[in-house]
């Protein structure tokens, strides 16, 4: 049974005394939206459970009262036995340059395909043999030797793409980085963009800092971060002399057990059992949907 984790917004000004969070100084105006995240069934992980919810709020509400979101924070509440976490989305009024950087990710893509290793062909089209022998039937196996089918590498449909986006120093927190580190090596649990579930693989991110002078002549640290993905379509996989087909999501793994039997002139390895395996865990990719859907779909 899934944990019932909920997030509620609460009035931070009641705690901090009126308008404390909103400075009247030019270019330093800030506002904080605060949340309580709690689990009705027990404990809650601040990094794995609470932070994605707070970040999703920031991505869904990037601008508040003319200010762009600057950072997200979470912290467990002492004495709550791990059942309550406080979260914050901080908005800053340092100027409009932040909106321009966050609003338009740079998008790179390639449809040059990927490489897959196959042990059986779609069809054996022809064959020849030496005098005095009949052509052996290897049941579409490829490059067969005494150890079995060795197969061949082929190019298969695949999609490589990445998004490049700039974040200010305040946004690139440990919570932010650890979230995407944990999601690396996961596939989409639900359909996203043109990819059915299980067909979009998050390969991780890399980033580099740089210093920029803002419109007020102040030095600021920013990070250029690349989010890398691969995509592979679903497919049907069949084997010779087997009934039915395996329904393979993009990043499932298909393998077959080959049975050895002797013929007149050689040893035949024939697949007798075949399996489709789930090898990548699935994750909620809603954070990527909020970051990049407008870029992918052109809206």
Image (cartoon, grey):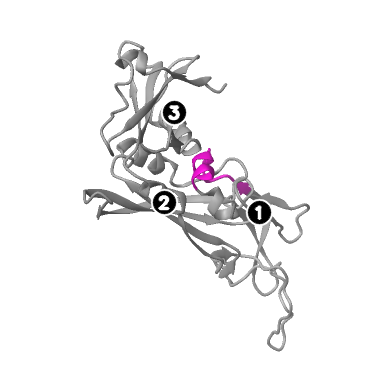
Residue 89 lies in what quarter of the image? top left
What kind of element bears circle 3?
Answer: helix
CA gap between label 2 and label 1 equals 37 Å
Residue 130 lies in what quarter of the image? bottom right
Residue at 55%, 61% (x, y): give it.
159
Residue 274 in sight in this render: yes
Tell me the crowding category of disc 1: few under 14, some 14 to 19, or many 20 or more residues within 10 angstroms, Cα based: some
Q: Was residue 164 drawn as part of the magenta stretch in this picture?
A: no
Tell me the magenta residue range. Answer: 276-291
Question: Which of the two discs, 1 and 3, sits closer to the camera?
Answer: 3
Q: Which numbered disc covers residue 234?
A: 1
> Do residues under tags 1 and 3 come within 8 Å of each other at their CB atoms?
no
Q: Was residue 281 drawn as part of the magenta stretch in this picture?
A: yes
Q: Residue 149: x and y, percent?
A: 59, 66
Residue 65 lies in what quarter of the image? top left
Question: Can you identify the residue that label 2 sits on?
Answer: 100
Q: Residue 41: x and y, percent?
A: 50, 14
> Do residues under tags 2 and 1 come within 8 Å of each other at their CB atoms?
no
């Amino acid at each position: 049974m899934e944990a019932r984790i909920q997030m509620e917004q609460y009035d931070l000004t009641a705690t901090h005394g009126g308008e404390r969070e909103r400075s009247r100084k030019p270019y330093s105006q800030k506002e904080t939206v605060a949340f309580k995240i709690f689990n009705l069934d027990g404990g809650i992980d601040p990094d794995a459970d609470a932070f994605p919810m707070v970040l999703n709020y920031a991505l869904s509400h990037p601008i508040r009262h003319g200010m762009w979101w600057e950072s997200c924070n979470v912290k467990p509440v002492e004495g709550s036995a791990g059942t309550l976490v406080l979260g914050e989305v901080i908005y800053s009024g340092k100027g409009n340059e932040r909106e321009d950087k966050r609003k338009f990710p740079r998008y790179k893509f390639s449809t040059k395909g990927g490489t897959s290793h196959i042990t059986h062909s779609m069809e054996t089209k022809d064959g020849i043999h030496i005098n005095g022998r009949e052509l052996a039937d290897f049941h579409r196996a490829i490059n067969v030797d005494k150890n079995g089918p060795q197969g061949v590498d082929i190019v298969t449909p695949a999609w490589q793409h990445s998004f490049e986006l700039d974040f200010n120093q305040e946004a690139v927190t440990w919570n932010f980085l650890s979230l995407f580190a944990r999601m690396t090596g996961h596939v989409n649990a639900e359909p996203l963009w043109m990819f059915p579930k299980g067909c979009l693989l998050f390969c991780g991110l890399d980033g580099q800092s740089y210093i920029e002078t803002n419109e007020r002549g102040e030095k600021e640290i920013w990070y250029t971060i690349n989010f890398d993905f691969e995509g592979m379509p679903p497919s049907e996989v069949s084997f010779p002399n087997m009934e039915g087909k395996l329904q393979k999501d993009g990043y499932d793994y298909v393998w077959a057990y080959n049975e050895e039997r002797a013929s007149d002139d050689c040893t035949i390895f024939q697949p007798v059992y075949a399996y489709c395996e789930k090898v990548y865990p699935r994750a909620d990719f809603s954070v990527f949907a909020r970051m990049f859907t407008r870029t992918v779909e052109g809206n």
